[in-house]
Amino acid sequence: MGVKIREIIPEPAVQKITLESLSGKSIALDSFNVLYQFITIIRGVDGRPLMDRRGRITSHLSGLFFRTINLLKVGIKPIFVYDGRPPELKRETVEEREERRMEAAKLYQQALAEGRIEEAQKYAKQAATLSEFIVESSKKLLYLMGLPVVQAPSEGEAQAAYMVARGDAYASGSQDFDSLLFGSPRLVRNLSIVGKRKLPGRKEYIEVEPEIIYLDKLLGELEINREQLIDMAILVGTDYCEGVKGIGPKTALKFIKTYGSAEKALKAMGKNLDVDPGEIRQLFLNPKVSKDYSIEWREVNYDGVKKMLCDEYDFSEERVDKALNELREALKKTRGATSLDQWFS
């Protein structure tokens, strides 16, 4: 879920952009974040995800295939970064999330049986989880599409931020703001969910546009440094700690600017955390990342993609052919390239 600090991010640090404005730029995507988006958004009217004839979920493959091709058509270079083993401090958070998902799954079945469709849709999204099948099948599809996959030793967002800081990618791509805490100079949001989206629990729709947040501008506008941004997040709550009950981003920012650190702010409030703030701070400042990774663009295996999606997972042959032909045409228009490697070199 990530830290919730959206309300204190000043407008000068955020720039609304178009997909076309990112043409030629590589974006290190937080794959788990992207996959969660697909399995929660791409669902039927009753809240069920897309499935093949064997009952296997295919929402993630649909989103990954069609929406990634939309990015490739405008010249965006996606790099998919996958999570590894989470830090020990995150274990409790992961377990709590799993319990909530199991409870949501029960409520979904009950609401569905009673014909409460809107409630069923809500609970279905809350019950979404990334199984090993979803992760591995997504990697297989990306490989067939010739796209680079980077396996992080721990947090995918930390690895993506590291790659951006090294200059191997232009920006991190995620809905979560943790990328900024991990030090990514630029964070692109809404990359995979561009278009109209229904507001939860309301019959209204909003237009979702991509946006980019610049870390240096954010820190400058807030008049704090990165360590203080992390400390503010610690007070609000992160994946590694619950934070201080009743403290939101605005109050947390005020305390950090007044006292300078999470430790001093907690002392002034007369509060304690179950975890040492210094330990959490180090997880963001010095996360476990790999320096030995490869970013390789390969030729698209058109036949392999079609066989996987259509033969294995019952995708519409017509839709898959149409999307692959669009990708072929996009490659041809770009200096006569025949592969992604030539296109992006």
Image: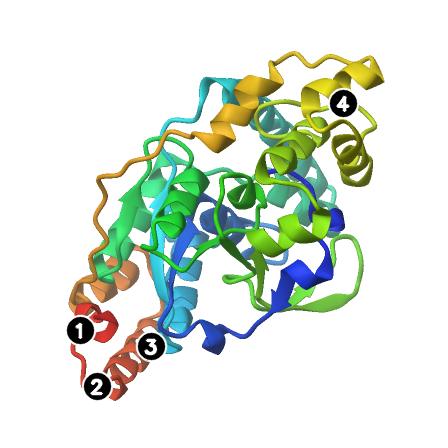
CA separation in Å, label 2 and label 3:
28 Å
Mark 2 element type: loop
Q: Residue at x 32, y 81 (%)?
A: 326
CA separation in Å, label 3 and label 4:
60 Å
- Please give the residue where the numbered disc 4 appears in the rendered image: 265
Frontmost residue, 178 versus 306: 178
- Please give the residue where the numbered disc 1 appears in the rendered image: 342
* Disc 4 residue type (three-letter): Ala
- Numbered mark located on residue 318 in the image: 3
Of labels 2 and 4, earlier in sequence is 4
* Disc 2 residue type (three-letter): Arg
Of labels 3 and 4, earlier in sequence is 4
Mark 1 element type: helix
Q: Residue at x 43, y 39 (%)?
A: 158
For the residues labelled 2 and 1, say whether their Cβ atoms are less than 8 Å apart: yes
Q: Is residue 222 visible?
A: yes
Q: Is residue 297 above or below residue 257?
A: below
